[in-house]
Amino acid sequence: MRNTFPDPPSYYAAVNPAPRPRAALRGENRADVAIVGAGFTGLSAALHLAERGARVVVLEQARVGWGASGRNGGQVHTGQRHEQDELERVVGRDDARKLWDMAADAKALLRELIDRHAIDCSYEQGLIHADHKPAYVRETHAYAETLARDYDYPHVEPLDRDQLRALVRSDDYHGGSIDHGGGHLDPLALTFGLARAAEAAGATLHEGSRVLRLKPNGRVVLETAEGSVIADHALICTDGLLDGLQPAVESHVMPIANHIATTEPLGDRLQKALTSRAAVSDSRFVVYYFRPTPDGRLLFGGGETYSTTLPNDVAPIVRGHLEKVFPQLKGVRLDHAWGGVLGVTPTRHPFVRPVAPNVLVAAGYSGQGVLLGPMFGKILAEAVAGQLGRFDLLGRLPVPAFPGGTWLRKPILVAAMSYFALRDRL
């Protein structure tokens, strides 16, 4: 089934002028590398490959930034999707350290790309973790100690109940931490900037060019409605929007929809909810996340659905979650409300693998794509060039197929997510 979510009236689309449309792919084309998807991963891969001198063609079914890269909460976390103690348990201490170093490199790469290509994406420092259950606070503080002691990262400051509530004015939270090395940004502005950089380096971007078939046979052939690309390598960088193209990926990566809204400009009322410029994400399995925008709004994300067709009216879904956390904002006007589709895996580890001869994939970021997407694009470029160290490291993360394959994965995931959502409320 084709992913059919509409162009959303998003805050990001309202504040970022749309670039000129890129032409759709037509006729027969040749490339060293063809990339499916013009989001963080695909554009970063295109940039790094083009800088190496490769002929690169990027195929985007809609517009640059149309997928999760241009719609998400914009939060820049530290580390991989799982905490380090969990990674140590799964892959061992040595690989866990390498994954930590990779994530540190990802943060440095993100800032380097922003600075080198003069991308104005409103980057701000600070990311608060808020615990919605008292029992979680001790674990959060212990993890801050672990990072300082074992991973040379002293930038996570534990917060008790009063310290947390001085920053996040909600009775919903009981403590947490603030990561002074985390941050937040405008993801659509970042995506537009990466696209400009990739084109300046020599990559060719085609919009309105949905890939209908991908046929690996020595060289890889990618076919759209009006054209084709014959490439030595293909990179699948679509996250949750694969749309039937590669079953070997879809059995491991499941699309889910998340919803976001922004309030009207709040002026001094914003201080009734947030007293710092840091972003916030909480301890719920179905996470709430929110942050101030540069023009004084509250951007709030909450609520997931398990369909690639979004509701006609997203605002009421988000409003219920927002007013649960901040009842003092009850009735506030919501100026923008939208959703987007992201990819999750059964273990919440990213799915980075070869899936056919000369076909590589990086997907399933499970909400960590702002940090990891640009780095994983660079790692795909390294793999194409024969530098496999970091690519193979990611391949050692366990990502089994969803039980039941592509047919039963949805009802099984819905049941599991409903269970965890119930636990959040208890």
Image (cartoon, rainbow, N blue to C red):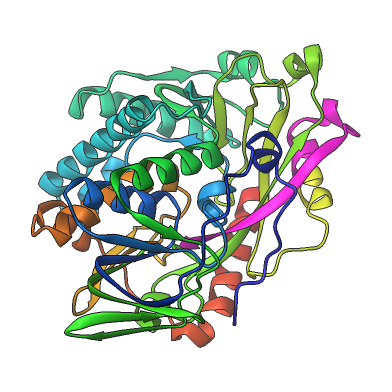
Q: Position of residue 348 (x, y in %)?
A: 40, 58
Left or right of residue 401, residue 274 in this image: right
Q: Quadrant of residue 21?
A: bottom right
Say which of 16 and 359 sits in front: 16
Q: Residue at x 71, y 38 (%)?
A: 14
Q: Residue at x 45, y 38 (%)?
A: 193
| Residue 418 visible within the image | yes
Quadrant (top left, top right, bottom left, bottom right) of the N terminus: bottom right
Q: Position of residue 67 (x, y in %)?
A: 55, 57
Image: 423 above or below 218: above
Task: Name the outermost residue toward the right.
Answer: 331
Left or right of residue 343, residue 237 in this image: left
Q: Quadrant of residue 230?
A: bottom left
Q: Residue at x 28, y 29 (%)?
A: 108
Say which of 126 and 220 sits in front: 220
Image: 148 above or below 21: above
Image: 222 above or below 126: below
Left or right of residue 122, residue 86 in this image: left
Q: Position of residue 16 (x, y in %)?
A: 63, 36
| Residue 393 visible within the image | no
In magenta segment, residue 426:
no
Say which of 261 and 219 sits in front: 219
Q: Position of residue 34 (x, y in %)?
A: 31, 67
The residues colored magenta run 321-344
In magenta segment, residue 341:
yes
Image: 208 above or below 292: below
Say which of 67 and 249 sits in front: 67
Left or right of residue 23, residue 402 in this image: left
Q: Quadrant of residue 328?
A: top right
Q: Residue at x 41, y 55 (%)?
A: 365
